[in-house]
Image (cartoon, grey):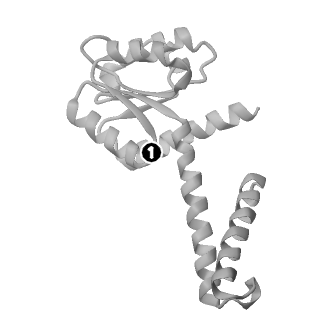
Amino acid sequence: MPMKWQNYYNKLLSKITNYYCYRYGANYYQLYDNYKNSLLTAIAIVILMESSSNNNDYYILLVEDEKDIIELFTEYLSSSGFNTISFQNPMEALNYFYQNQGNCSLVITDYKMPQMSGLELIEKVREKDTDCKIKTIVISAFLKDNLPYDKSYFFTVDKILEKPVYLDRLKKVIQELISTIDIQQKA
């Protein structure tokens, strides 16, 4: 267990144990087994809730011109604990990004959109994010037909997913990319 969680666990254990001991007039070793199990379960739940809330440090910029898809992705990602800012218009998304660039950790974009392509959007993001700290995902319905033959975009796009994108796959890819952000920040 990481030191942060060990300290958190010890403080929580102490507080909850003191509460049970005060309430039932016993020390920890005298508590009934079912109270000990409840105590440990409560601590485990708090630690899980705390660790899952770490996703809230990450802001995802989601750009998709299809309303149904953007609503589905936004709802799913939000319910999974990710802060998600969604746009149907890539120009609006880009303007938002320019004003809030420091808070963005991941851009998920459709490839084919009316105002600009997803690759063009990522190119604009990379103009501000020259060290590629912001991770990127491009989603396309027809990978072979839509993506250009120029492979230079491979250096600016972290993942390419083909539609239909299954929600659990999307979540897994996001978690993988976010874990690389954590590793880069520690290095």
In the picture, measured across the screen, residue 173 lies left or right of residue 37, that is: left
The quarter holding residue 181 reads top right
The image quadrant where one finds the N terminus is bottom right
Q: Relative to residue 118, is residue 72 drawn left or right?
A: left
Count of numbered badges drawn on the protein: 1
Q: Position of residue 4 (x, y in %)?
A: 74, 52
Q: Position of residue 97 (x, y in %)?
A: 45, 17
Residue at screen point 65% across, 80% down = 20
Instruction: Between residue 161 and residue 22, name the one nearer to us.
Output: 22
Camera-side residue: 173 or 95? 95
| Foreground pick, 97 / 34 | 34
Q: Secondary structure at mark 1?
A: helix
Residue depicted at x 69% and y 68% = 15
Q: Residue at x 78, y 54 (%)?
A: 3
**Residue 136 located left or right of residue 19:** left
Q: Position of residue 146 (x, y in %)?
A: 31, 20
Horizontal side, residue 27 vs residue 69: left or right: right
Residue behind mark 1? 171
As displayed, is residue 42 above or below residue 6? below
Three-letter code, disc 1: Lys
- For disc 1, the neighbor class at 10 Å (few under 14, some 14 to 19, many from 20) is some
Q: Where's the C terminus, which quadrant?
A: top right
Image vertical order of residue 29 relative to residue 96, above or below: below
Please name the residue shown 63% across and 82% down the image.
23
Residue 130 location in percent, x, y? 60, 12
Quadrant assignment, res 102: top right
